[in-house]
Image: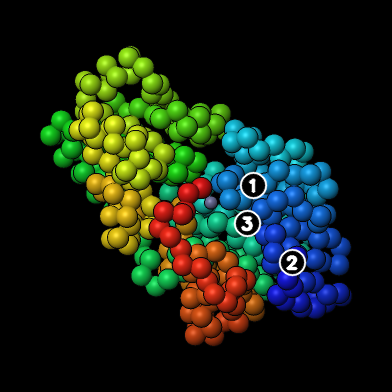
Amino acid sequence: MTKAVSSFESKENGTTISYGNGITVNTPSFSIALDPRSASESNYAFVSHAHIDHVHVPNGKSKIIASQETKELAKMRGYNLGKLDHEVSGIETIDSGHILGSKAILIDDKILYTGDLCTRDRAFLKGFKGVKCETLIIESTYGRRHYVFPETEVVTSQVNKFISECFDRCRPVVLTGYPLGKAQMISYLFDMWEPVYLHESIHKMNYGHIKLGIELKDFEMLSSGKESEEKLSRGPWILIAPSSGGRSSFVRTMKEKYNAVIATFSGWAIDSRYRNAMSLDRAFPLSDHCDFQELVVFVKNCSPSKVYTVHGFSMEFAAYLRRLGFDAESLEAANEPQRRLTSFAH
Ligand SMILES: [Zn+2]
């Protein structure tokens, strides 16, 4: 069941926005499901990007709207989006700056849905600054006031200093992040170090990026076996690996066998309890999302007459926007679930 949360009249006819299996927009000409979690009955289904919580297995009833990059990256993760519809009257997709291929969507020049969003230019991605719209549906992952991230250059220089100190003490470093998006950002930002090795899952996604034209160094994949163990025993080195808690067997092996230092990259690193909860040595606040202030600036740039917030601190963010004079509400239930710090895997 989808619950209609809003309806408004366009010049000629009514358009409704519903929230249930993703967000569904019904215009007089077509219906479109935005990031549905499962196959939809709408005319179109929009897949904003290839993170697992945004892709689904289509059933052929809805035509799929996604970027070619999202299609390729989703395929590498086991999701076949099938044939894409690139030219649809009344629909425009815009780079959302979150990961390679991520898109926002503008419907009938009126309704903007951001998907996951980042306004900062960084490495090979350009931030999305916003477009004027009547209705804005915006992600609010970090929609709480204290989530304010330092400049990417500041974090980069902190990380380089950290790696340098570890290397001085002959200690190898494991840098961890989401396999798609964050790991490529890490690969790009710290490619002056050597040797750098890649965990198999990261190598796969880096290779996907290189194939799609992103200039990443072709770092060596670390396979299990004697040869890799010999390489690692020569330390120090950097290994880029998927996020995993300090209690995982992978992290334990890296620490016990190679005396490695483990660092992770996430916007949640703003919370000091995050590093402790993850039992990791260091956590750096490098995110593929907007921070709180960037979300506010984005909303102002769009100057919408109605704002819906979704994901993360959607209730708090909507409340803040109302204090600024916006007509804003959360698409999510009144009782916003308490987010667990370990439940944000993509
Ligand atoms: Zn995402």
Residue 72, position in %: x, y? Answer: 63, 35
Element under disc 3: strand
Q: CA distance from mark 3 to mark 1?
A: 14 Å
Dot in front, 1 or 2: 2
**Disc 3 residue crowd, few under 14, some 14–19, many 20+, Cα 10 Å:** many
Mark positioned earlier in the residue sequence (3 or 1): 1
Which residue corresponds to the image point at 20% horizontal and 44% vertical from the top-left? Answer: 161
Residue ID for mark 3: 104
Identify the residue under disc 2: 2
Tell me: 135 left or right of 223.
right
Tell me if residue 310 comes above or below residue 168 in the rendering: below
| Badge 3 or badge 2: first in the primary sequence | 2
Per the model, the C-alpha gap separating discs 1 and 2 is 19 Å
Three-letter residue code for mark 3: Ala
Q: Position of residue 67 (x, y in %)?
A: 66, 44
Q: Please tell me whether mark 1 sits on a helix, a strand or a loop.
A: loop
| 46 or 212, nearer to the observer | 46
Is ligand 1 less than 8 Å from the beta carbon at label 2?
no
Q: Is residue 284 visible from the viewing direction of this image?
A: no
Q: Amino acid at mark 2?
A: Thr
Q: Residues within 10 Å of mark 2 (few under 14, many from 20)?
A: few
Count the marks. 3
Residue 207's spot in the image, x, y percent?
A: 51, 28
**Residue lying farthest top?**
227
Q: Which mark is residue 55?
A: 1
19 and 157: which one is in front? 19
SS of the residue under disc 2:
loop
Give the amino acid at mark 1.
Answer: Val
Residue drawn at 29 percent across, 32 percent down? 253
